[in-house]
Image (cartoon, helix red, strand yellow):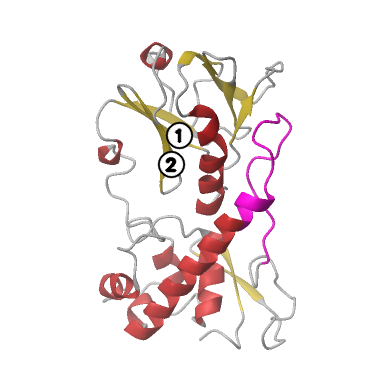
Amino acid sequence: MPELPEVETVRRGIAPHLVGEKIDRMIIRQRQLRWPISRTLPGAVANQCVHTVGRRAKYLLIELDDGHLIWHLGMSGSLRILQNLPTPGTHDHVDVCLKRGATLRFRDPRRFGSLHWTCVDPLRHRLLKNLGPEPLGEEFSGEWLYARSRGRSGAVKNFLMDSKIVVGLGNIYASEALFEAGISPVRAAGRIGLDRYRRLAEVAKTILGQAIKAGGTTLRDFTKAEGEPGYFAQELQVYGRAGEACSRCGEPVRSRIIGQRSSFYCPQCQN
């Protein structure tokens, strides 16, 4: 599944091609995504101008004259800007055709993505209104994590992946941040002190920032239909490296299921 850095990179990739453009029409070939796309959506967005392309958590927010598109890529979705529109494939579910000829195409093989329309503040939408702070924003801090972890006996890995606590720290980046902070993923969230949470928030910001920077400089071309959906290779310290030697101490990296997700950690460096 695309995580926050991938979604932010998608936003940066498509925004220059959309902002200032007017929508000619929207073509929906498959309405049945995670939630059905409204039948009235094509009529609602036709002839509207794109003003901004923003992001909240893993949702893209495309601001038009009279409302916002709220777009989630799901587990396998991708967005591309196409000039010479190729014949749509089986999984090409939505086209947003612009007046000047370019098309934003949404491809989603697993159909876990979603597309919504709202005429009010998108941050009040049911999918967004209860989300925690952005991990790169000022509100997210060690103090924030410490205050909200008091009395929690569950694993800190699950705590970090709770979108009401902080958005965008998915499985990969939660594992990496905990490694950099030297915190075991199974340690009870309520038994971690303020100083360690300060360190955790600091390294989480650094890791996500580096991932976004890497995506912006090494990713694919958003104007080619055959491009990959938005993932990029990054130097990961523990995620996906079970059995390999820890880069710090040489102890084999371990994997265990926490909250139904595979978690990777070094038993020597994290406690």
Magenta-highlighted stretch: main secondary structure? loop
Please tell me whether residue 250 is drawn above or below residue 4 in the rendered image. Answer: below
Q: Is residue 96 toward the left or the right of residue 70 in the image?
A: right
Q: Tell me which label, 1 or 2, sits earlier in the chain.
A: 2
Amino acid type at mark 1: Trp
Q: Position of residue 148 (x, y in %)?
A: 27, 70
Q: Position of residue 69 (x, y in %)?
A: 40, 29
Amino acid type at mark 2: Tyr
Q: Is residue 169 toward the left or the right of residue 236 in the image?
A: left
Q: Position of residue 90 (x, y in %)?
A: 68, 22
Q: CA distance from mark 1 to mark 2?
A: 6 Å
Q: Position of residue 252 (x, y in %)?
A: 71, 81
Name the residue nearer the viewer: 158 or 131.
131
Q: Where is mark 1, residue-wise?
A: 71
Question: Residue at 28% across / 49% down in the picture?
Answer: 130
Q: Quadrant of residue 135?
A: bottom left
Q: Where is mark 2, residue-wise?
A: 59
Q: Quadrant of residue 128?
A: top left
Residue 131 magenta-highlighted: no
Exactly how many numbered labels are in the figure?
A: 2
Please rate how many residues cluster around mark 1, counting C-alpha atoms within 10 Å: few if below 14, some from 14 to 19, many from 20.
some
Question: Residue at 55% across / 35% down in the picture?
Answer: 14
Question: Residue at 53% across / 34% down in the picture?
Answer: 16
Disc assigned to residue 4: none
Please rate how many residues cluster around mark 2, counting C-alpha atoms within 10 Å: few if below 14, some from 14 to 19, many from 20.
many
Whether residues under marks 1 and 2 lie with C-beta atoms below 8 angstroms apart, the answer is yes
Q: Which residues are magenta?
A: 214-235
Please tell me whether residue 94 is drawn above or below residue 150 in the rendered image. Answer: above
Residue 95 can be seen, yes or no: yes
Please tell me whether residue 245 is drawn above or below residue 86 in the rendered image. Answer: below
Q: Is residue 161 toward the left or the right of residue 212 in the image?
A: left
